[in-house]
Amino acid sequence: MIDKKIKISSGLINKKNKVIYLFIFLSLNIFGLTGCVNKKAYNHNNEKPYVLTTFTILADLAKNVAGERILVESITKPGAEIHSYQFTPSDIVKTKGAKLIIQNGLGLEAWISKFMMSAGDIPKVKLTDGIKPLLIDGDAYAGKPNPHAWMSPKRAMDYVDKIADAFMKIDPEGVTEYKSNASTYKAKLELLDKELRDSLSLIPKERKFLVTCEGAFTYLASDYGMKEAYLWPVNSESQVTPRRMVKLIKIIKENKIPTIFCESTVSSEAQMEVAKSSGAVFGGTFYVDSLSGLNGPAPTYIDLLRHNVGLITQGLSLFPLEK
């Protein structure tokens, strides 16, 4: 009887020990996993300054200036709609250890003030400071600055200069490298500007009318002698109205515009209807507020502009002019 009680007690102790061991095992694993997550979230290579940009295009510009001296990441992912982006707790986590946040400005990032309140006291630079903006023409936004200055390679060079200046402040030892990287990249943008100008010169003067969903091509149109029309001024007011659609259809018919386009971060459904009603062809998808993925048509800023201008040239050049 005593032996039986001992065996029962021993079994209870063994079960209790197993429960304790299991608890310790799970605790250690959870702790380890948490440590991995935190390490991944917070370890941005302490040997390098860490910089955030508000969207992927600015990250690409900044990486070309940074070289190997600075780690650059975008708060938003490829494909994100930038104007009214809803940031997440994981976006705030990204700011830990950041030495600088780079934004476009001119009202593009409507969410940036709230984001900075959550992120804390991190230096910030606006790349459009000092740039004379082109103004939005017509509609509720009339007279307000168009924020899409990066769509002009010439103005993107100003962005590069501001990025280099900001990097030299947070990492003075890299002055020579940042100046060299900026100079090299600006030379590429100079060549890109000539390339785009040559390509768009193939379009007959009567056809140089760019129709898009968003009025994001004002700077590009200004650089290369084009007119533009769109469904809405900026994506923060992307709700399509019958009045806007009717107005755009009228412009397309009156100017005999053969091809119209839309952007990757918004639905092209309304523009498809405009094409159908106006007799125009839908010519494809532009990249404006975001790069594509690495395997897409616009993995870099230079690729983005080449892709867009390629579509414009093809869409407005290959149809025979009506006499």
Image (cartoon, rainbow, N blue to C red):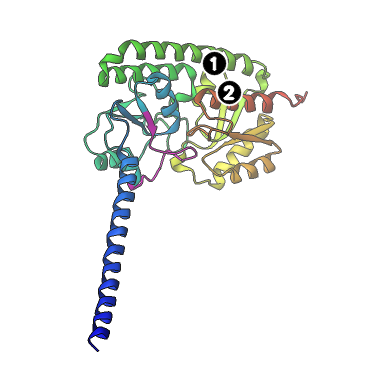
Question: Does the magenta run of residues contain 36?
Answer: no
Of residues 222 and 303, which is closer to you in this image?
303
Residue 112 horizontal/vertical position (percent)? 32, 38
Image quarter of the N terminus: bottom left
| Circles 2 and 1 in contact, beta carbons < 8 Å | yes
Mark 1 is on which residue type? Leu
User: As drawn, is 123 to the left or to the right of 197?
Assistant: left
| Residue 2 to residue 136: above or below | below
Residue drawn at x 48%, y 37% is: 78
**Which residue bears the numbered disc 2?**
306
In which quadrant of the rendered view does residue 314 lie? top right
Task: Check disc 2 and give the amino acid type.
Answer: Arg
Residue that numbered label 1 is attached to: 192
Residue range corresponding to the magenta coloring: 72-89
In the picture, the quarter occupied by the C terminus is top right
Q: Label 2, label 1: how many angstroms apart (C-alpha)?
A: 8 Å
